[in-house]
Amino acid sequence: VQFVESGGGLVQPGGSLRLSCEASGFSLDYYVVGWFRQAPAKEREGVSYISKDGDKHYSDAVKGRFTISRDNDKYTGYLQMNSVIPEDTAVYYCAAMIDFGDRDLRTLHPSDFNLWGQGTQVAVSS
């Protein structure tokens, strides 16, 4: 049971990247999929979440620029990053937690998630 992330790299300010995380050994159908990031010397922070029913939440830092999505048939979650800025530089992680339908996405915390990818580096620089 694992996540495999891909899509990170170096991008110029104003550019775009699409991160992917593919689940191996389990189906995403009944999980919340979340994206988190951690910059050097900072705590891991939630970026975006998507419920099993497709409800979405974004942090204020990325709202309007990032789009989360999922394709359960492909066991894959995505994070489309547009109009990136240097402050988006971080290691990005995807994660999953079982979706019982009883949690407000706005209240989720990294400790709620029990399945994690290995992380992919995103660097925004000219």
Image (tube, rainbow, N blue to C red):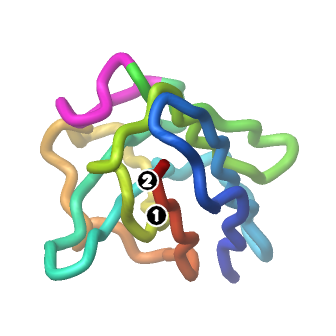
- Amino acid carrying label 1: it is Tyr
Q: Is residue 50 left or right of residue 37?
A: right
- Quadrant of residue 41 within the rendered picture: bottom left
Image vertical order of residue 59 relative to residue 93, above or below: above
Q: How many marks?
A: 2
Does the segment drawn in magenta span residue 57? Answer: yes
Does the segment drawn in magenta span residue 19? Answer: no
Residue that numbered label 2 is attached to: 35
Foreground residue among 46 and 75: 46
Most common secondary structure along the magenta stretch: loop
- Tell me the residue at 47%/67% (across/down): 93
Image vertical order of residue 13 relative to residue 91, above or below: above
Q: Secondary structure at mark 1?
A: strand
First to last magenta residue range:
55-64
Locate residue 91, reporting x and y percent. Answer: 43, 70
First of labels 2, 1 by sequence position: 2
- Amino acid carrying label 2: it is Trp
Locate residue 81, reporting x and y percent. Answer: 53, 35
Foreground residue among 43 and 32: 43
Q: Is residue 23 left or right of residue 82?
A: right
* Dot label at residue 92: 1
Q: Quadrant of the N terminus?
A: bottom right
Foreground residue among 75 and 79: 79
Q: Are marks 2 and 1 in contact (CB under 8 Å)?
A: yes
- Tell me the residue at 86%/47% (across/down): 74
- Tell me the residue at 56%/82% (across/down): 118
- Quadrant of residue 105 within the rendered picture: top left
Assess disc 1: are there few (<14), some (14-19) or many (≥20) residues with their C-alpha within 10 Å of its C-alpha.
Answer: many
- Tell me the residue at 27%/70% (across/down): 39
Q: Is residue 83 left or right of residue 38?
A: right
Assess disc 2: are there few (<14), some (14-19) or many (≥20) residues with their C-alpha within 10 Å of its C-alpha.
Answer: many
